[in-house]
Image (spheres, helix red, strand yellow):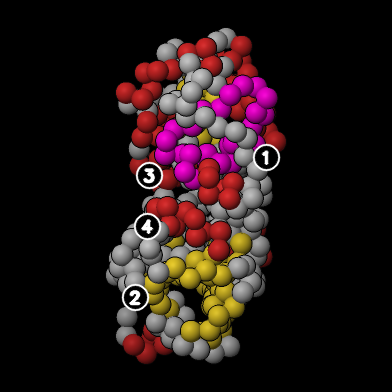
Amino acid sequence: MPAKQEEDLLVVARPEGLYCPPGDFYIDPWRPVARAVITHAHSDHARPGHAHYLAHTDSAGTLRTRLGPDIDLQTLAYGEVIEHHGVRVSLHPAGHVLGSAQVRLEHGGRVWVASGDYKTGPDGTCTPFEPVPCDTFITESTFGLPIYRWPTQAALFAEIDAWWRANAEAGRASVLFCYAFGKAQRILHGVDASIGPIVVHGAVEPLNAVYRAAGVALPPTLRVSDEGVDAALLKRALVLAPPSAQGSPWMKRFGNYADAFASGWMQLRGTRRRRGVDRGFVMSDHADWPGLQQAIAGTGAERVFVTHGSVQVMVRWLTEIGLDATGFKTEYGDEDDQEAEA
């Protein structure tokens, strides 16, 4: 892109990632850069190798767990403003996972917001999404099709609890595959822990510790190696494991178990069959179609850039309602995108 054209934009797409020319920093870059503002700690948005990181305070534990304790990390509270090369930068709740943030940029009388990944419905495990007024909004579109409409939190957990309770009464473990960061903690926070013991995979427990340290209420959890975890206990247990555990030797200890998968893609016919599980629960940490519409309208933005997901559909819809819309090519592809490819 010509330098003059870049000067007219607060964020442009470069090979390293989304770049702020006047501020000389990147937002969620996928290649190593000198200064990176990170919206959240999922691995497609928070990558290793940057010289300096800026993120929300609640992302610190997860970022250091995943990227190393010695990363050069600066943190901000929601709404706290810093100025860098004349660009005023602040972070605002995205409602996606713990510490997730939208990045507000103000420079030369213009206000842009890069939302990262977001979810508009509150779930009790992170600060709920807040629309941030702006001139230009950068939105994801992972589930940017009208077919995607999530059940209420109450309806979702009524389904999960009923499935777990029926399995426990039948004497078989309930293995629920879910992403280790975000979904697992949301499930822990929402289920009825009186039904039975809860066992988690080794990939899940360190992230539970980060959530607990941030003040998020989670029920007690066990690992299969803990004292007292035997065949009798496992027959009543809810077991949370990442998708990578499916079909692994780790699963053999649960005997004749029932299994399920939690993902927004479970709304698609055939996805559960391809995953080879008994049940599918429609659950995502991303906004559904009504949520995307609500979030974009809430900003009051006249110009919208659309990133990963159903970009063409979202751009067409935004154009039809009178907004200036175009797509940004990115290399994001989080847990839900990966599930779609599977």
Q: Name the residue carrying label 4.
A: 68
Q: Are marks 2 and 3 in contact (CB under 8 Å)?
A: no
Going from N to C along the chain, the mark reached first, 2 or 4, is 2
* Secondary-structure class at tag 3: helix
Residue 30 visible to an observer of this rendering:
yes
The image quarter in which residue 157 lies: top right
Q: What amino acid type is highlighted by mark number 2?
A: Ala
Going from N to C along the chain, the mark reached first, 3 or 4, is 4
* Residue range corresponding to the magenta coloring: 182-207
Q: What amino acid type is highlighted by mark number 1?
A: Thr
Marks 1, 4: nearer the viewer: 4
Residue 309 visible to an observer of this rendering:
no
Q: Name the residue carrying label 2.
A: 34
Residue 255 among those drawn in magenta: no
Q: Are marks 3 and 4 in contact (CB under 8 Å)?
A: no
Q: Is residue 249 above or below residue 142?
A: above
